[in-house]
Image: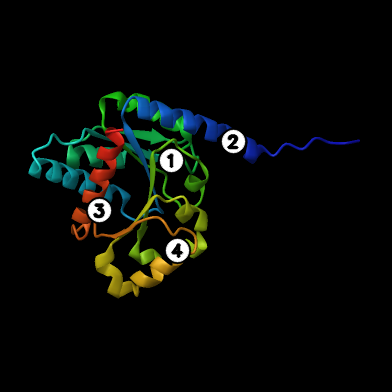
Amino acid sequence: MDVKTIQLKKTILEDNDRDADLLRRQMEDQRTCYMNIMSSPGSGKTTTLIRTIRTLEEIAREEGREPLKIGVMEADIDSDVDARTIIEETGAPAVQLHTGGMCHLDADMSRQGLAEIGAGDLDLVFLENVGNLVCPAEFDTGAAMDIVILSVPEGDDKPLKYPLMFREADVVLVNKIDAAPVFDFDKERFRANLGSCNEDAPVFFISAAKGEGAREWCSWLDQQVRSYLDK
């Protein structure tokens, strides 16, 4: 007797990809730039977001422009610590998304979060995805850009160990660069390792806590967002 075998993971991913493409078009139509931030726990995602939001505001003021209207979706298995931190430190609207034990967000979860935060009234929405270097890379969230953060203490070999995560990156931030001498982190070795799976993603070396490299990163990001909104 023949038994029909269904590849569930493939089916789930294909369904999610269709949802993600639809969500991306919806965000384009309403002129909201949606960005997905991925990294391992402790890499400094929330601190990087705070520094990024503040620096984007500084750039806009210096250029005599209205600051971008920014919102943040914080995804975690539990707690609302990160959303509270964003609101307290930046004043930006933030919502906490609990994944019910899941290690990633998908397109439908993103849609629910974007509706809750009122994305139609915002220029830019960041998703701080669940912290790990595996699952989030497998699920398209519908974002216009995938940002991957690696912290120096994790080591410069991570693109070799987690190639899918770094292959999906549209831009890579190497955080805690001020600690590079302590952890024997080599910038050129990291670039070479990244190049083995992704030759196109720009790399910015930053210290979110101290501000090093933040201006260069945010000037690039500001241009990307404005180009998106001007389409």
SS label for mark 2 = helix
Percent of width and height locating residue 161: 51, 63
Q: Is residue 133 left or right of residue 94?
A: right
Query: In terms of image quadrants, where is residue 3?
Result: top right
SS label for mark 1 = loop
Amino acid type at circle 3 is: Trp
Percent of width and height locating residue 98: 41, 35
Percent of width and height locating residue 163: 51, 58
Q: Could you tell me which residue is drawn at 34 percent across and 25 percent down?
A: 116
Q: Nearer the viewer, mark 4 or mark 1?
A: 4
- Alpha-carbon span between mark 3 and mark 4: 20 Å
Amino acid type at circle 2 is: Glu
Q: Nearer the viewer, mark 4 or mark 2?
A: 4
- Alpha-carbon span between mark 3 and mark 1: 29 Å
Report which residue position mark 4 lands on: 195
Report which residue position mark 1 lands on: 77
Report which residue position mark 2 lands on: 14
| Label 3 crowd (10 A; few <14 / some 14-19 / many >=20) | many
Report which residue position mark 3 lands on: 217
Q: Could you tell me which residue is drawn at 24 percent across and 32 percent down?
A: 93
